[in-house]
Structures are given as structure tokens and as C-alpha cells.
Image (cartoon, rainbow, N blue to C red):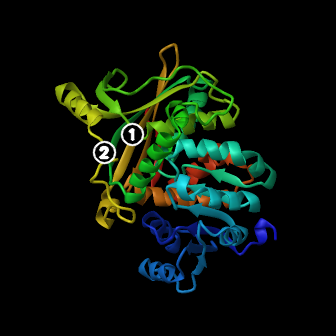
């Protein structure tokens, strides 16, 4: 059957997991939308029913049994949906069978992957087939990397409007984040490190800002690997743990769109810690204190409490600079815990936006595939704002 005739618009695969449950809960309560045909998928019908009741989803919500180790179940799931959003990670351990099933069926796909080595492997292996089948594959459709990917996109749009040209230098400065880490994120980091330890050559992809732009390497990028006094803001800044994936996705969006922001784009990300000696001390502390990858990491299935998710937030500044000294600033701000409360909304809206897109198939980024259409959905439904500040 054609994609338009399939029984479901969106299937949430991994709905019994920590983040998958949040995605299902978001869809279950509509948020101003009607008519969306969606379903919950996972390994256990009993657990799916339990989660359905726990989140207050309608009793007739469709429950689909599918397992990453059962290709036939994945093929059936992919063939019944216009889009699959999957929260089942680490993706390098469990992601390829789901992605392969979606590519084969021409089904759109979104995930929360922050594992660049696996992403590059999937690009090399499946991009050509996805283009042939029309499957639109959107990696990193959560806090990594949507606010950053779309933040640069909207900054460049504003730059063209104001200056008549894009800016070749973009500085991303995280002004504030408030949220927690789940066991799934910790497991993904450990799996990435294990993969590189087993095959050290993969480390070259991890450290290369252009690791997701096959055949293209741009100019040298700022290392952003130690604390510094940031002249653009007058604040001390320290390395941002998510820059290793976000920078690659920003450059891939530019690459896939045909380099509308130039082949000379220079982009980095850092966390602002404040001015003066106190800001310097905080920057130095954060630079040597791991926030994840420690024995105290939460276990899979664990994560921030409902109160922590509700009280979370993030505030990210993008500064675009021209060689003649002119500059432009844009802020991206979101309610809720960034990694879970907001991420669950981002991937859900990405899945819905994919079903409404006429973009060609292939392995892309939310920015390259959906662009401003996704920005509008996030502003309308997900309580995320993109606003020029000067």
C-alpha cells in the first residue's frame, strides 16, 4: 500500500522505555492536534498496555509488538506507518535493524542518536537506498541536535535578511541549562567509547567536525576544548559536552542544502559560566569534572523526575559575525528539562512534520529535511522559541 494508505501516521518504537514513554504521553494528550493516527510499539504487549494506562492514553490506542532482534516484526511495523520515531538506544547496538526496515519500506524515521560514528556508518550504508525508496531519515531529533541545527538555520536566515548574505562565523554559547541525565544517555556514551576501543580508526570520525559530510572538509574549526574568556559575551566559557555531535550536524545540514552558508563556515559551541574570577573558576571546574560516564550514572530506565522535567529549561545564544565586524544574535529558548521533557516534544513533532513533508528521501538532518516547517511546529506546540535579539 502507498504511504498515504497506511493505518498509522506515527509509531513510537520503544514506548515502554523512559524517553519513549514521554513521547507517547505527549502524543496521547494531543496538544492542539486532532486526527493524528498513532501507535505505541515495543517488545511486550503487557508492558505497552501498562504504559498506555499509566500515561492516560485512550484505551483503544494501538499496541504493536516489535523487537530489534526480530526483522519480520520490524518490517511489519515499518510497513504500517508513514513515520517511525525510535527511542531505542544505544543505536549502535539496537538501531540498524529499525533503520533498515524503514529504509526498505520507504518509511520516514526519526531518532535521538548522538552517536556520530554509527551515524556515519549508516549514511555510508543506507543513504543511496533511502533516496531510492523515498524514506526520509532524520537523526538527532532531540536536544542533540535540533536547537543547534535549527538555531544556526534561523540565524543565517536572519543574517541574509539583514546583511544580504550569510555569516561565515557562528558562535554558539549555552547561557543556561537545567535538567538531568537518563540511563539511556549514559549507555549510549559507553557504547560509543566501546566501539572506538574495539576499532580505534573510528575515532577519526568522532573528532572530525566534518565527520558527517562525506567527501567534503571545510576550514579548520576552533578546538573549543579548554576554558577561555569569550570576547563576544564578556564571559568565561568552557567546553560543551554535546558539541562533538552538534557541530557535525550543523555542518551536515549546510552540506546537504548545498552550502547556502558557504563552504567556509566556522562554528563552535561552548558553555558560558560568567565574568570575572568566579566565572573563570566555574569554567575550570566544569572542564575537568565529567558530567556523564561515571560510576554514578543512572541505570537504563532511570531519569529526571516529573518535577525536574517540568522545572527544566535551556537558553542558547547564537552569534553570527561578518569579517567587517557586523554581527547578529539569535536566542533559542525552551521550557522543560532539555534532554527529556523538551526532547520528547521535539522528536514527536519531527515525526509529525515528516509525514507532512514533500522532501526527497535520504539520510539527512531535521534542519536539512524539514527546516522552517519544523521551527514553526516547535514554536506552536513544543514551547521553544527562536528569536533575533538585536
Residue that carries the numbered disc 1 in the rendered image: 241
Q: Is residue 301 left or right of residue 346?
A: left
Q: Residue at x 73, y 55 (%)?
A: 135
Residue at 63% x, 67% y is 10
Whole-percent x, y for residue 349 in the image: 56, 59
Which quadrant of the figure has residue 161? top right
Q: Residue at x 28, y 52 (%)?
A: 295
Q: Earlier in the sequence, mark 1 or mark 2?
A: 1
Q: Position of residue 89 (x, y in %)?
A: 50, 58
Crowding at mark 2 (Cα within 10 Å: few <14, some 14-19, many 20+): some
Residue receiving disc 2: 291
Badge 1 vs badge 2, beta-carbon distance below 8 Å = yes
Position of 87 relative to 8 (above/below):
above
The one of 45 and 51 positioned closer to us in this rendering: 45
State how far apart marks 1 and 2 are (Cα): 8 Å
> Callout 2: helix, strand or loop?
loop
Amino acid at each position: 500500500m502507498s504511504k498515504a494508505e497506511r493505518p498509522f501516521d506515527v509509531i513510537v518504537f520503544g514506548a515502554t522505555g523512559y524517553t519513549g514513554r514521554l513521547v507517547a504521553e505527549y502524543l496521547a494528550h494531543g496538544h492542539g492536534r486532532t486526527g493524528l493516527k498513532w501507535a505505541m510499539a515495543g517488545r511486550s504487549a503487557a508492558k505497552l498496555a501498562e504504559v498506555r494506562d499509566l500515561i492516560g492514553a485512550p484505551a483503544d490506542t494501538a499496541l504493536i509488538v516489535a523487537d530489534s532482534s526480530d526483522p519480520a516484526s520490524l518490517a511489519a511495523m515499518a510497513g504500517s506507518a508513514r513515520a517511525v520515531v525510535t527511542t531505542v538506544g544505544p543505536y549502535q547496538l539496537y538501531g540498524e535493524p529499525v533503520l533498515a526496515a524503514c529504509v526498505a519500506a520507504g518509511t520516514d524515521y526519526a531518532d535521538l542518536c548522538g552517536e556520530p560514528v554509527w551515524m556515519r556508518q549508516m549514511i555510508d550504508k543506507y543513504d543511496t537506498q533511502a533516496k531510492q525508496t523515498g524514506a526520509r531519515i532524520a537523526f538527532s531529533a532531540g536536544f542533540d541536535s535540533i536547537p543547534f541545527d535549527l538555531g544556526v538555520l534561523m540565524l543565517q536566515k536572519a543574517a541574509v535578511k539583514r546583511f544580504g548574505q550569510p555569516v561565515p562565523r557562528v558562535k554558539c554559547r549555552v547561557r543556561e541549562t537545567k535538567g538531568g541525565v537518563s540511563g539511556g544517555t549514559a549507555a549510549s556514551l559507553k557504547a560509543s567509547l566501546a566501539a572506538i576501543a574495539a576499532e580505534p580508526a573510528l575515532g577519526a570520525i568522532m573528532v572530525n567536525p566534518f565527520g558527517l559530510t562525506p567527501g567534503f572538509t571545510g576550514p579548520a574549526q576552533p578546538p573549543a576544548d579548554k576554558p577561555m574568556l569569550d570576547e563576544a559575551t564578556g564571559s568565561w566559557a568552557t567546553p560543551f559536552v554535546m558539541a562533538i555531535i552538534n557541530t557535525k550536524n550543523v555542518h551536515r545540514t549546510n552540506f546537504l542544502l548545498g552550502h547556502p552558508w558557504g563552504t567556509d563556515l566556522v562554528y563552535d559551541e561552548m558553555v558560558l559560566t560568567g565574568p570575572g574570577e568566579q566565572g573563570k573558576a566555574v569554567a575550570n571546574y566544569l572542564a575537568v569534572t565529567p558530567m556523564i560516564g561515571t560510576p554514578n550514572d543512572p541505570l537504563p530506565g532511570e531519569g529526571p523526575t516529573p518535577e525536574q522535567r517540568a522545572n527544566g529549561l535551556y537558553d542558547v545564544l547564537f552569534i553570527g559575525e561578518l569579517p567587517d565586524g557586523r554581527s547578529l544574535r539569535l536566542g533559542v529558548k525552551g521550557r522543560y528539562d532539555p534532554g527529556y521533557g523538551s526532547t520528547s516534544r521535539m522528536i514527536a513533532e519531527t515525526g509529525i512534520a515528516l509525514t507532512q513533508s514533500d522532501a526527497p528521501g535520504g539520510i539527512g538532518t531535521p534542519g536539512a529535511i524539514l527546516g522552517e516547517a519544523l521551527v514553526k511546529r516547535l514554536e506552536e506546540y513544543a514551547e521553544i522559541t527562536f528569536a533575533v535579539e538585536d
